[in-house]
Image: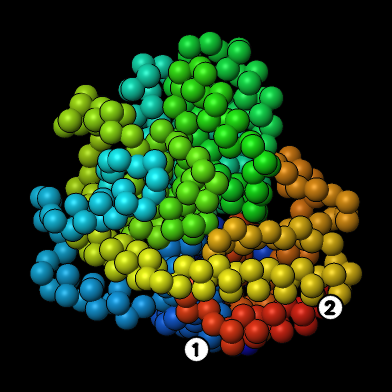
């Protein structure tokens, strides 16, 4: 595969921006090699600067649930752009998207739009602190909620991929109120609440830990967290930036019958444009300025183009059969990966939920990954790197890290899933 243009572009980029990328997970650091510079996308495919075509399972890290450049999204955006790209004043579009989110995500009664998942989570925690008058928060090792200072503690995603310790530049005073526990360990959280009575404002959790690979919550775990929060006067915050509109249209909370106090959203609700949102029960959300005293603002928040792309995406996703079709493709893909790995005699741990999936190559067949500690212990990142590149050579683009999730879109039809499984079958015999 000729990648000379990507190599030239990457060399230039490294002189222009740190590491040559504008977000660390793009840099292929843990899998090695040169990141592909992408020129265009259509449906399930994207093309790099050298003209190589890939079936895309990263989908901009989740947002593109209808695939690249879906006609309904593109057409709506073209019309919206012609009317102006930002006003710094409210629009009807914000009402429409807020109402759609409220109608679809069960626990949500009010929404505040921001520009990214980072902003959504950062603001959700400020809200929990403002609402409860308490300072401490709980997060889980290997979970990633964006790069706000207080949340860069035992973080997943790029921090896990690069094997970084907690980031320099984050003052100890800022993380002093961040308590951590291992994912799926309810007892650890019980102990934290016992240790800090009346001090914990809220607990934030990814319902599926999808920034340290793909770890499903154990039966009853998330409800157990919610119950502990409520017994102790803390808010239960679900970070559904990745799982929102992906595990089910109403997110993991709809699929699993959970009622968080605050929900963080992003990715799909912006249809590929920069967006985030925090949302929740009315009396909690009324704490936010100008309705209440907690300050949070943004020049481009509720941006008309982002609202337009989100509306077109979600409306199309909610058409009969669309979501279920993507979920079915995801199931077919994961079952196929499991079968191919079994045939090749390679131990893996694969799982999926709705339209998301993930799998680990295991260093030992009896290794079971349930949290960040076991992910670091059992995940065979070296084999993942070989698998990633062998697939890339065959025109299949998975996330460039063992510690990230995969995504499927409505544009991934039988042909794409079939070709992908064929490639995976070949690759798994190669990386044995
Ligand atoms: N949530 C994404 C990683 N899991 C964000 C992508 C990025 O950090 O660039």
Q: Answer with mark 1 or mark 2, whichever residue precedes in sequence.
A: 1
Where the C terminus falls, by quadrant? bottom right
Q: Which is nearer the eye, 164 or 199?
A: 199
Disc 1 is placed on an element classified as loop
Residue 373 at x, y = what percent? Answer: 73, 40
Where the N terminus falls, by quadrant? bottom right
Residue ID at (17%, 75%):
79
Residue ID at (10%, 50%):
89
Disc 1 residue: CB within 8 Å of ligand 1? no
Disc 2 residue: CB within 8 Å of ligand 1? no
Residue 285 at x, y = what percent? Answer: 28, 33
Foreground label between 1 and 2? 2
Q: Which mark is residue 105?
A: none
Q: Which is nearer the eye, 413 or 16?
A: 413
> Which of the 4 image quadrants contains residue 40?
bottom left
Observer able to see residue 267: yes
Residue ID at (67%, 64%):
31
Residue 49 at x, y = what percent? Answer: 47, 83
Alpha-carbon distance for marks 1 and 2? 27 Å
Density class for disc 1 (Cα within 10 Å; few <14, some 14-19, many ≥20) is: some
Q: Is residue 400 above or below residue 282?
A: below
The residue identified by callout 1 is: 51
The residue identified by callout 2 is: 429
Q: Is residue 386 left or right of residue 98?
A: right
> Which of the 4 image quadrants contains residue 25?
bottom right
Residue 365 at x, y = what percent? Answer: 88, 56
Q: Is residue 233 above or below residue 120?
A: above
């Amino acid at each position: 595969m000729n990648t000379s243009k990507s190599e030239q572009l990457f060399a230039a980029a490294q002189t222009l921006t740190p590491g040559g990328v504008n977000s660390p997970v793009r840099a292929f650091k843990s899998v090695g090699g040169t990141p592909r510079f992408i020129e265009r996308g259509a449906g399930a495919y994207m093309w790099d600067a050298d003209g190589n075509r890939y079936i895309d399972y990263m989908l901009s890290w989740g947002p593109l649930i209808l695939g690249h450049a879906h006609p309904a999204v593109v057409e709506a955006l073209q019309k919206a752009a012609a009317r102006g790209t930002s006003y710094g004043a409210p629009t009807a579009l914000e009402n429409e998207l807020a109402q759609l989110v409220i109608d679809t995500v069960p626990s949500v009664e009010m929404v505040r739009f921001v520009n990214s998942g980072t902003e959504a989570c950062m603001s959700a925690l400020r809200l929990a602190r403002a609402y409860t008058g308490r300072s401490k928060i709980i997060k889980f090792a290997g979970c990633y909620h964006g790069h706000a200072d207080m949340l860069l503690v035992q973080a997943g995603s790029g921090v896990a991929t690069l094997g970084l310790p907690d980031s320099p530049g984050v003052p100890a005073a800022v993380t002093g109120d961040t308590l951590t526990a291992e994912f799926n360990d309810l007892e650890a959280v019980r102990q934290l609440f016992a240790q800090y009575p009346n001090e914990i404002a809220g607990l934030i959790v990814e319902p599926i830990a999808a920034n340290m690979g793909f770890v499903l919550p154990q039966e009853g775990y998330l409800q157990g967290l919610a119950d502990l929060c409520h017994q102790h006067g803390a808010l239960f915050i679900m970070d559904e930036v990745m799982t929102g509109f992906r595990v089910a249209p109403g997110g993991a909370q709809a699929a699993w019958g959970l009622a968080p106090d605050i929900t963080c959203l992003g990715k799909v609700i912006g249809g590929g444009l920069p967006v985030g949102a925090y949302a929740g029960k009315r009396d909690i959300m009324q704490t936010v300025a100008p309705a209440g005293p907690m300050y949070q603002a943004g020049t481009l928040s509720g941006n008309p183009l982002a609202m337009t792309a989100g509306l077109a995406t979600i409306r199309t996703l909610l058409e009969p059969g669309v979501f279920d079709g993507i979920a079915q493709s995801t199931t077919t893909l994961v079952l196929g990966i499991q079968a191919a790995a079994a045939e090749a005699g390679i131990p893996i741990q694969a799982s999926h939920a709705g339209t998301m999936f993930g799998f680990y190559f295991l260093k030992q067949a009896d290794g079971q990954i349930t949290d960040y500690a076991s992910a670091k212990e059992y995940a065979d990142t070296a084999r993942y790197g070989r698998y990633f590149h062998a697939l890339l050579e065959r025109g299949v683009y998975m996330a460039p890290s063992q510690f990230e999730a995969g995504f499927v879109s409505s544009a991934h039809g039988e042909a794409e899933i079939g070709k992908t499984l064929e490639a995976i079958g070949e690759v798994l015999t190669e990386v044995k």
